[in-house]
Image (tube, helix red, strand yellow):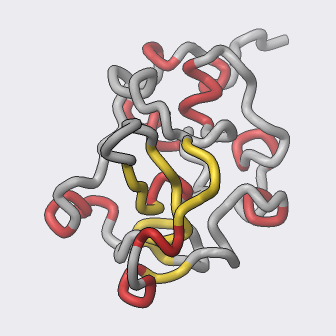
């Protein structure tokens, strides 16, 4: 019997670069615009998708070159994951950083990359394109992240 843990159950600092990238659940929620309240410093989510986000697949259309097109795109690293307070509660990076298991719908657990969408955990079906959004204030989530 092989008692070796699957890589997604290992601590984040034990993952190699390929395992780190594979941990992403493909929800696309980190690729939605955020707004910070200048007075309170609260960060609010929106339903506005980054111009590089394919709103059907919830994947970046130019992931390797995204920083060239969107300079303020966050490159999430093992060192930063604990500092990024706006990551969704269901984010695999956040969950593993906090010592929690991946959800049953995560493709590494269930084997189905469409499960994130079926579970309603992705951006599919409820976002607006950046070029169609207008004022960001019209798209703020009611509660800070």
Vertical side of 32 occupied by 37: above or below: above
Q: Quadrant of the C terminus?
A: top right
Residue 120 in percent (x, y) is at: 79, 61
Q: Is residue 13 above or below residue 143?
A: above
129 to 39, vertically: above or below: below
State whether residue 75 is above or below residue 65: above
Estimate the x, y position of residue 33 in percent, counting from the top left.
42, 61
Q: Nearer the viewer, residue 85 or 5?
A: 85
Rendered-image quadrant of the N terminus = top right
- Is 5 situated left or right of 138 in this image? right
- Residue 25 location, x and y as percent? 62, 48
Residue at 68% x, 40% y: name it: 90
Closest to the observer: 8 or 88?
Answer: 88
Residue at 56% across / 44% down in the picture?
Answer: 144
Specify whether 139 is left or right of 105.
left
Given residues 72 and 5, the one toward you in this image is 72
**Residue at horizontal 53%, vertical 63%?**
140
């Amino acid at each position: 019997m092989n008692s070796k843990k699957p890589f997604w159950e290992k601590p984040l600092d034990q993952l190699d670069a390929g395992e780190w990238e594979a941990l992403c659940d493909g929800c696309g929620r980190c690729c939605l615009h955020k707004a910070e309240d200048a007075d309170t410093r609260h960060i609010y989510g929106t339903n506005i998708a980054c111009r590089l986000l394919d709103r059907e697949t919830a994947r970046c259309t130019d992931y390797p070159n995204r920083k060239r097109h969107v300079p303020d795109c966050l490159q999430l690293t093992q060192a930063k994951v604990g500092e990024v307070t706006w990551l969704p509660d269901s984010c695999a990076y956040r969950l593993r950083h906090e010592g929690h298991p991946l959800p049953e719908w995560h493709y590494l657990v269930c084997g189905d990359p469409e499960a994130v969408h079926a579970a309603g955990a992705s951006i599919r079906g409820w976002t607006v394109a950046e070029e169609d959004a207008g004022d960001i204030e019209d798209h703020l989530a009611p509660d800070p992240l």
